[in-house]
Image (cartoon, rainbow, N blue to C red):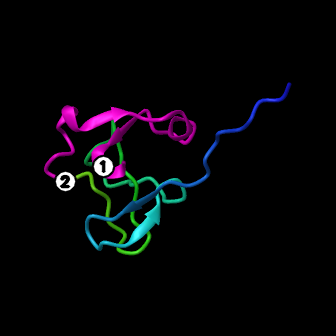
Amino acid sequence: MGQTSTARTSHSVECRHCGKEFDLLAATWCGCGVRVDRPSKVCPYCMQCICLHPDYDNEALWNNAPRYLREHGFDRLFYLYL
């Protein structure tokens, strides 16, 4: 029997800087250097990442990423990306 694929190819989020919706999986990883250990993604509209968000260092606001996001480089997911 074949397995049904549950892979998702997109994950829409709202940019906290400009308010526009973008695909987290298609966005580029930031290179700002603020969080080398846990970079965020860059909004393709305003070109901002969320590494400087005041809650970004709060571990309580991070969850394990779903499997489809782990397959795209996310081990944990910041609450703004839910």
Which quarter of the figure is the N terminus placed in? top right
Which one is nearer the viewer's eye here, 25 or 49? 25
At which x and y percent is residue 61?
Answer: 22, 38
At which x and y percent is residue 54?
Answer: 13, 50
| Residue pointed to by mark 1 | 33
The local crowd at label 1, few if under 14, some if 14 to 19, many if 20 or more residues have their Cα within 10 Å, is few
* Residue at x 29%, y 74% (from the top left corner): 18
* Residue at x 50%, y 54% (from the top left corner): 11
At which x and y percent is residue 78?
Answer: 31, 43
Report if the CB atoms under discs 2 and 1 are less than 8 Å apart: no
Q: Earlier in the sequence, mark 2 or mark 1?
A: 1
Give the image quarter of residue 5.
top right
At which x and y percent is residue 59?
Answer: 21, 32
Give the image quarter of residue 39.
top left
Say if the magenta span includes residue 72: yes
- The CA distance from mark 2 to mark 1 is 14 Å
Residue depth check, mark 2 versus mark 1: number of the one nearer the observer: 2
Task: Examine the rendered structure and indicate whether residue 45 appears above or below residue 66.
Answer: below
Give the image quarter of residue 48.
bottom left
* Residue at x 30%, y 49% (from the top left corner): 33
Asked if residue 1 lies left or right of residue 34, the reply is: right
Q: How many numbered markers are drawn?
A: 2
| Residue pointed to by mark 2 | 53
The amino acid type found where label 1 is placed reads Gly
Secondary element at tag 1: loop
Q: Residue furthest right?
A: 1
Q: Which mark is residue 42?
A: none
- The range drawn in magenta is 53-82
Q: Residue furthest front?
A: 1
Secondary element at tag 2: loop
* Residue at x 29%, y 51% (from the top left corner): 80
Asked if residue 5 lies left or right of residue 55, the reply is: right
